[in-house]
Image (cartoon, helix red, strand yellow):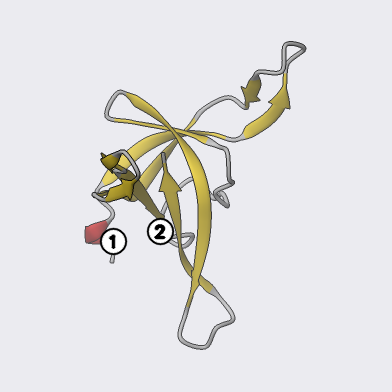
């Protein structure tokens, strides 16, 4: 699996809000041995079709560094663009007691 985790990105966890109500983040950390994959989608609405493209970040706790648990609303920077984690899904091993990897939807 390690050969599939070929990317690196920066990760900043949400820290709260400032006095103006803007989101604040912790100091960014570089995540190594992760995978970021585009998810191309089209959403239909009353006014036609719109692109609903996203990215998925794959983070494996036993391989990826540093050791974190991805959080919703965290900021991920990859390829010169900043994204926000919309949702995090833990994926468990076959026995169901250990997290194999996390899948985080980036928007």
Residue drawn at point x = 26 percent, y = 51 percent: 41
Taking the view exactly as shown, the residue that stands out farthest to the front is: 46
Q: Please say if 19 is above or below 71.
A: above
Q: Circle 1: is it few (<14), some (14-19), or many (20+) Cα within 10 Å? A: few
Image position of 14 (left or right of 3): right
**What is the CA distance from the residue labelled 2 to the residue labelled 1?**
7 Å
Q: Image quadrant for the C terminus?
A: top left
Image position of 101 (left or right of 35): right
Q: Circle 2: is it few (<14), some (14-19), or many (20+) Cα within 10 Å? A: some
Residue 52, image quadrant: top left
Numbered label attached to residue 72? none
The location of residue 12, given as percent across then percent down, is 54, 31
Taking the view exactly as shown, the residue that stands out farthest to the top is: 20
Q: Are marks 2 and 1 in contact (CB under 8 Å)?
A: yes
Residue drawn at point x = 28 percent, y = 44 percent: 7
Q: Nearer the viewer, residue 70 or 89?
A: 89
| Numbered disc 2: secondary structure | loop
Numbered label attached to residue 63? 2
Q: Nearer the viewer, residue 42 or 24?
A: 42
Residue drawn at point x = 52 percent, y = 65 percent: 90
Q: Please say if 13 is above or below 103.
A: above
| Numbered disc 1: secondary structure | helix
Instruction: Tell me the residue that label 1 is attached to.
Output: 2
Marked residue nearer the N-terminal end (2 or 1): 1
The location of residue 17, given as percent across then percent down, is 72, 22
Q: Image quadrant for the N terminus?
A: bottom left
Image position of 38 (left or right of 90): left
Q: Please say if 72 is above or below 61.
A: above
């Amino acid at each position: 699996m390690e050969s599939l985790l070929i990317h690196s990105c920066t990760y900043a966890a949400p820290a709260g809000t400032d006095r103006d109500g803007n989101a604040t983040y912790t100091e960014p950390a570089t995540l190594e041995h992760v995978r970021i994959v585009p998810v191309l989608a089209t959403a239909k609405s009353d006014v036609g079709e719109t692109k609903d493209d996203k990215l998925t970040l794959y983070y494996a706790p036993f391989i990826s560094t540093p050791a974190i648990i991805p959080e919703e609303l965290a900021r991920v920077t990859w390829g010169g663009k900043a994204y926000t984690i919309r949702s995090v899904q833990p994926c468990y091993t076959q026995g169901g007691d250990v997290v194999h990897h996390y899948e985080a939807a980036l928007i």
